[in-house]
């Protein structure tokens, strides 16, 4: 993969694809950013390009899914304003792709690229319009790397191109934990559906010393073993998948660990009556909403002694206070681990932020979907095109 060291940017106009798909609150035109981590994540690349003599930075990003329509609620205006504050220079928002309408300034941001109908179709004509704005291209949007879109795939074929520092670090870190992990390697896999994560589980069955399962995805495993799941969220399509994973783990000598106790509720609500279950057979009318304290303690012991940890997916409904303890215990163990700790974005990143631990991991991925596909061994179009 080509990096900034392979690209001459001195005196050049640099087209930079960034991932500024940030959460917003409020109504247009007064929407506010509730988490600017993705904007801050791009700063090292933007500052490096300026230090290397780039004449101008022209930034491209998407926000939400406007589907080729100019939805005012998905304008990048709040993002441009926040980036101006972080960079200490004015970041003007371009009204269109017309070079004649490109604002003056050292840093310019194009409006939401998904306003353009051809963006998600990897349209070569749209890519040519992007390329006409600059001399070289840098992709730093790992969160979009698993998509072949005009702003991160077709355009990279039209200009001298390379990966930014964030994209480079993401790829090197995630491939590193698969190829050369410090042992023991522990994978923590949670969330709602086994079918969504089976590719990740399969990848670690061949490499990990232990895989820790949590969240609602544990219930297809329990059902495959003949346990009662009550009213718990249990993906029926995941039951045979879970059964096969259990067989594969046994055959490959990988310890695939399931919860030993649970925290139950009558409904998915912070106000529901809470029941501690010292076991895993869920009574009818109750649903499992968190791993129990014995499981949390056992999982934490596995994590803190690991040489490498990969975590993707919560242990329960951590957004509901009565069911946050399991995810919090795992987050604290990951933060306390002295080995390499990699968190695969999404809800795991949100949990770290909720518990104030996001700065205490080795690497917090900015791309949930992209990180999972890379772990699964899939080719990422936005990365492959830079190779």
Image (cartoon, rainbow, N blue to C red):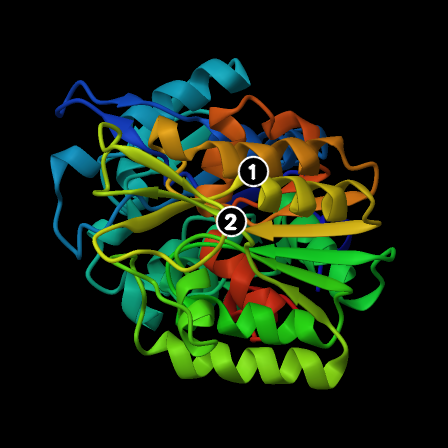
Decide if residue 177 is in sight here. Answer: yes
Q: Is residue 95 left or right of residue 133?
A: left
Disc 1, disc 2: CB below 8 Å? yes
- List x then y, in percent, for residue 224: 44, 78
Look at mark 1 in the image and give the residue it sits on. 293
Q: Which mark is residue 261?
A: 2
Q: Nearer the viewer, residue 374 or 75?
A: 374
Q: Which residue shows up at 47% across the image and 26% down it?
A: 354
Quarter of the image for the C terminus: give it. Answer: bottom right
- List x then y, in percent, for residue 334: 68, 38
Q: Is residue 52 left or right of residue 83?
A: right
- List x then y, in percent, for residue 360: 69, 28
Q: Nearer the viewer, residue 345 or 234?
A: 234
Q: Secondary structure at mark 1?
A: helix
Q: Which residue shows up at 66% across the image and 78% down it?
A: 249
Q: Earlier in the sequence, mark 1 or mark 2?
A: 2
Measure the alpha-carbon separation of dots 1 and 2.
7 Å
Please, is residue 296 above or below residue 377 in the view? Answer: above
């Amino acid at each position: 993969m080509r990096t900034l060291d392979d690209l001459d940017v001195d005196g050049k106009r640099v087209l930079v694809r960034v991932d500024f798909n940030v959460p917003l609150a409020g109504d247009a035109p007064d929407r506010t950013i509730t988490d600017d981590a993705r904007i801050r994540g791009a700063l090292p690349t933007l500052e490096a390009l300026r230090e290397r003599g780039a004449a101008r930075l022209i930034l491209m990003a998407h926000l939400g899914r406007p589907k080729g329509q100019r939805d005012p609620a998905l304008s990048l205006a709040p993002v441009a304003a926040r980036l101006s504050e972080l960079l200490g220079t004015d970041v003007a928002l371009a009204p269109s792709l017309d070079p004649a309408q490109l604002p003056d300034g050292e840093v310019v941001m194009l409006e939401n690229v998904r306003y353009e109908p051809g963006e998600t179709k990897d349209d070569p004509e749209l890519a040519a319009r992007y390329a006409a704005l600059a001399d070289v291209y840098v992709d730093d949007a790992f969160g979009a790397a698993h998509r072949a879109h005009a702003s991160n795939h077709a355009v990279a074929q039209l200009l001298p191109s390379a990966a930014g520092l964030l994209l480079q670090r993401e790829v090197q870190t995630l491939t590193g934990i698969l190829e050369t992990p410090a042992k023991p390697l522990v994978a923590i896999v949670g969330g709602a559906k086994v079918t969504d994560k089976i590719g990740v589980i399969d990848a670690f069955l061949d490499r990990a010393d232990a895989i820790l399962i949590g969240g609602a995805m544990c219930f297809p495993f329990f059902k495959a073993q003949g346990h009662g799941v009550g009213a718990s969220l249990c993906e029926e399509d995941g039951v045979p998948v879970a059964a096969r994973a259990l067989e594969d783990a046994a055959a490959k000598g990988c310890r695939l660990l399931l919860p030993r106790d649970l925290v139950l509720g009558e409904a998915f609500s912070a106000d529901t009556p809470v029941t501690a279950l010292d076991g895993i057979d869920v009574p009818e009318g109750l649903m499992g909403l968190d791993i129990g304290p014995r499981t949390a303690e056992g999982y934490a012991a596995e994590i803190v002694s690991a040489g490498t940890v990969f975590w993707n997916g919560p242990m329960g409904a951590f957004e509901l206070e009565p069911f946050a303890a399991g995810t919090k215990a795992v987050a604290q163990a990951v933060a306390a681990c002295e080995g390499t700790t990699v968190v695969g974005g999404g809800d795991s990143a949100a949990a770290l932020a909720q518990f104030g631990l996001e700065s205490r991991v080795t690497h917090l991925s900015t791309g949930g979907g992209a990180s999972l596909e890379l772990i699964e061994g899939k080719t990422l179009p936005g990365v492959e095109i830079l190779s």
